[in-house]
Amino acid sequence: MQFVMVVLRLAHIGAGAFWVGSGLMLVLVILPSLRRSGAEVGQRLPMAQISQAMAISSLITTIAG
C-alpha cells in the first residue's frame, strides 16, 4: 500500500509539473516570440501534439491526485 501511494504521488507531481510548465512555456515564451517574428502561429507550431501532451498530463495529474 505504501509503494502504491509513493508511485501515485510521484506521478501526480511529475505530470503536474509538466502540465504547468508546458502551459507557461507556451504562453510566456513560445507564442510571444512567434508573434514578434511575424510568423503565422498556426502554421509553425504543432498545436495538436502540444495540446494532446498537455491533456494526457492533466488527466494523469487528476487521476493520480
Image (cartoon, rainbow, N blue to C red):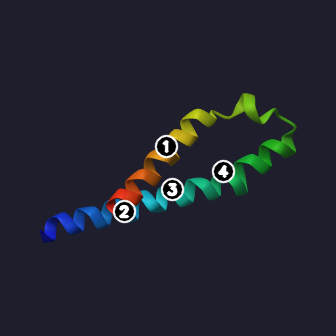
Q: Which residue is mark 3?
A: 19
Q: Are marks 2 and 1 in contact (CB under 8 Å)?
A: no
Kindly identify the residue that appears in the image at 31 percent across and 64 percent down: 10
Q: Please, what secondary structure does the residue beneath circle 3 have?
A: helix
CB contact under 8 Å: marks 3 and 1: no
- Counting every numbered tag in the picture gives 4
Which sits earlier in the primary sequence, circle 4 or circle 1? 4
Residue displayed at 83% across by 34% down: 39
Asked which secondary structure carries label 1, the reply is: helix
**Residue bearing mark 2:** 12
- Residue under numbered circle 4: 26
Is label 4 or label 2 in front?
Answer: 2
Q: Is residue 12 left or right of residue 1?
A: right
Per the model, the C-alpha gap separating discs 3 and 1 is 8 Å
Question: Is residue 29 rendered to the left or right of residue 64?
Answer: right
Cα gap from disc 3 to disc 4, whole angstroms: 11 Å
Q: Examine the image and state in which quarter residue 51 appears.
A: top right
The type of residue carrying mark 4 is Leu
Q: Residues within 10 Å of mark 4 (few under 14, many from 20)?
A: some
- The image shows residue 50 at horizontal and vertical percentages of 57, 41
The numbered mark at residue 53 is 1
Where disc 4 sits, the SS reads: helix
Which of disc 1 and disc 3 is earlier in sequence?
3
